[in-house]
Amino acid sequence: MSGLLSISVLVFAVYVTLYASLSQPRWNWDLIGTFGCAYELSGYDVASAHRWTYRDIDRELTASRVNLTLRSGDPFRTAVYEDPHSFAQQLPFYRTRPLYNLTVALAVRLGVLGSAWSTIWVSCFAAALTAYALFLWLRRHCSAPLAALGALLVFAAAPVGDGARSPSPDALAALLIVAGLALAQAPARLHAAAGLTLLALATAARPDMLILAVPLVVALALTEPNARRRLGHVVATVAAMVLFVTIQKVSGFYGWSTLFFHTFVEPLTHPATLQVTVSWDAYVDQLSRGLHSQGHEQALLYTGLAIGLAVFARRRSPRIAAISVAITVNMVAQYLLFPVWWAELFVAQYTVVAGVAILFVAQVTTTPSSRERSAGLPCASR
């Protein structure tokens, strides 16, 4: 029965994401940079990558979608479309996501539903697997029906579906975080090591996942009763940091100031030729405007839920409380570094918060054994 339910959850998640992704894709500017990096990884020079990127987009997407989401007639996007040198100088912003770019490059090489659509397929299956990973995590501590219902509700409520419809690494990063967090808490050492590895690798899918993965690993370490296993948490933390620094160096990333200016002040057609600084006034202004950016209602809801769990779960479930504190710290740090509440940036965070909320409810409504109480987790009712 449990195996059949597991398969049903995965099939349903795949069906929903496939339907949403293929019927209502959310094309955005990330498609340009992702394609350029994917073609670079496939051995193309910059001029060829530029030519093939726009050729694929013009061939596979309708003219209205191309004009609306990718060029829009504005000077910046027109310059990148017309000038291979400007195009090349956008790529360091996207090379910082090598795991996602490599996955897309592989999908392109396999000819998955056309090159442009390969980005949607990667996001689609990553989102479906995120829902399934959440189900397996919940299943370890709850009954199978409750775990299935909880996973599917989270899948519908959290912005996982939005991540599945976008040519962005958000769904892949969420998969690595959720699967990593689930495996890292497994009793088997090999599973725990695999989970910590996935948490560290999330940084290679999206660099800002560093400030989520590290707090989560620290939360797991602080609530790990076995002192010998904490060494793995230290290794994972160091590995994530080393991976982050290495990717930043190898990618030629321009730095936080250039990214902030490019995103919130003025898009830069040739960022490699400029020395950019962000004034205090510009930063404070964006902090103020970002508070009411798209998705701020969801951010308020999930941050409030994380804070509530951190307060009310600290005695009954120290690990749930610690994970909730880690999410709260991440939400604040993420906003201070990149002051917007766009929901797609927080797919992993919202999914984890919803998951631990379900675990806490399961714990409150069941009677834990002494072993499970000491571990700070809900009882497993099989």
Image (tube, rainbow, N blue to C red):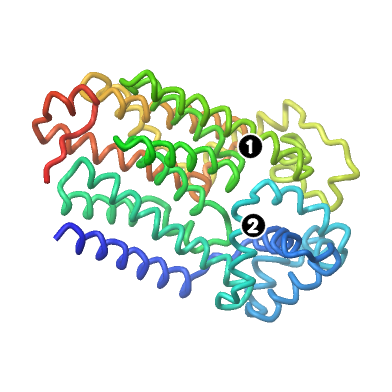
Is residue 291 shown above or below 152?
Answer: above
Q: Position of residue 226 (x, y in %)?
A: 33, 21
Q: Is residue 312 left or right of residue 213?
A: left
- Image coordinates of residue 257 in percent, x first then y, are 75, 34
- Mark toward the start of the polypeptide (1 vs 2): 2
From the viewer's perspective, is 17 left or right of 167?
left
> Of circles 1 and 2, which is in front?
1
Q: Is residue 298 visible?
A: no
Task: Give me the disc on residue 243.
Answer: 1
Using the image, determine if residue 113 lies above or below residue 36: below
Residue nearer the viewer, 225 or 292: 225
Quadrant of the rendering where the N terminus is positioned: bottom left
Q: Residue at x 42, y 70 (%)?
A: 18
Residue most toward the right? Answer: 273
Q: As displayed, is residue 276 above or below residue 271? A: above
* Residue annotated with mark 2: 101
Q: Amino acid at mark 2?
A: Asn
Instruction: Looking at the picture, tell me which residue is in the foreground, 231 or 241.
Output: 231
Residue 349, picture quadrant: top left
Q: Which mark is residue 75?
A: none
Q: Residue 66's x, y, as percent?
A: 67, 72
Q: Residue at x 32, y 42 (%)?
A: 354
Q: Could you classify mark 2 by the number of other residues whose Cα lies within 10 Å: few (under 14), some (14-19), or many (20 or more)?
A: many
How much space separates mark 1 and mark 2, taking CA atoms?
A: 16 Å
Residue at coordinates 12% horizontally, 46% vertically from top-left?
A: 382
| Amino acid, disc 1 | Leu
- Residue 119 visible in the snapshot: yes
Q: Is residue 56 left or right of residue 185?
A: right
State left or right for residue 39 relative to residue 11.
right
